[in-house]
Amino acid sequence: MVDESRRRVLEIYRDVDREVAAAGPVCIASGRCCRFKEYGHVLYLSNLEAEVLLADAPPYQGPITPDFCPFQQDNLCTAREPRPLACRVYYCDPTYQERAAEITETHLARLKSLSRELGLPWRYAPLHHFLNHPEDASSTA
């Protein structure tokens, strides 16, 4: 991974974490965030994020389906540090949904801008795609 892109993605994540903490959403550790099919959502991430995730996440068994996150165990995330933007922002707390959307849009725009600034390709796909095709996470042109 290109060190500069990794450093900058992690910087964006720190900003996201601060904004989410300031918003104060409630997490009841239900695990719904990671059971995509059961709760009707898809986790999308950029190739820049996928590269960070794949470099630091624990091993997983493929192929990965779009049904759930392979990093969830006992309703907790085993890839907490390198988790993508969408994971950092997602909470079931209904009072937080509008703020979550704002945080997501702001920092997704930053990720796109970073990709352009560094002259890197931009790919945006569901988690299972990058886990099954790690070569698509590469930040090389």
Image: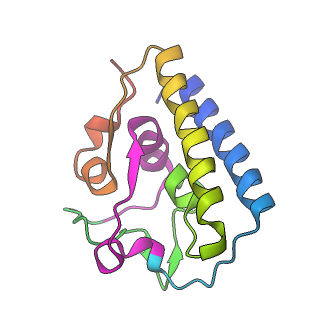
Task: Name the image colouring.
Answer: rainbow
Residue 127 horizontal side relative to residue 32, left or right? left
Taking the image as shown, residue 129 lies to the left or right of residue 34, namely left
Q: Based on the picture, tell me whether residue 37 belongs to the magenta stretch.
A: yes
Q: Which quadrant of the structure image shows residue 24?
A: bottom right
Q: How many marks?
A: 0
Question: Can you give x and y, in whole percent of width and height, for residue 53 in the image?
Answer: 47, 49
Q: Position of residue 63 (x, y in %)?
A: 19, 62
Whether residue 67 is situated above or below residue 110 in the rendered picture: below
Relative to residue 8, is residue 57 drawn left or right? Answer: left
Q: Which residue is pictured at 74% across the width and 52% down the height? A: 19
Q: As rendered, which of 63 and 43 lies closer to the eye?
A: 43
Q: Is 98 drawn above or below residue 92 in the view shown?
A: above
x, y (%) of residue 43? 38, 58
Q: From the viewer's perspective, is 36 left or right of 30?
A: left
Res. 94 image quadrant = bottom right
Residue at left 46%, top 45%? Answer: 55
Q: Residue 64: x percent and y percent?
A: 24, 63
The quadrant the C terminus occupies is: top left
Q: Is residue 75 above or below residue 5?
A: below
Residue 93 among magenta residues: no
Q: Residue at x 55, y 75 (%)?
A: 92
Q: Magenta region: which residues?
A: 33-60
**Relative to 46, does residue 19 appear above or below in the rendering?**
below
Camera-side residue of 115 and 63:
115
Going 65% across and 39% down the picture, which residue do you hit? 12
Along the viewing direction, whichever of 119 and 110 lies nearer the viewer: 110
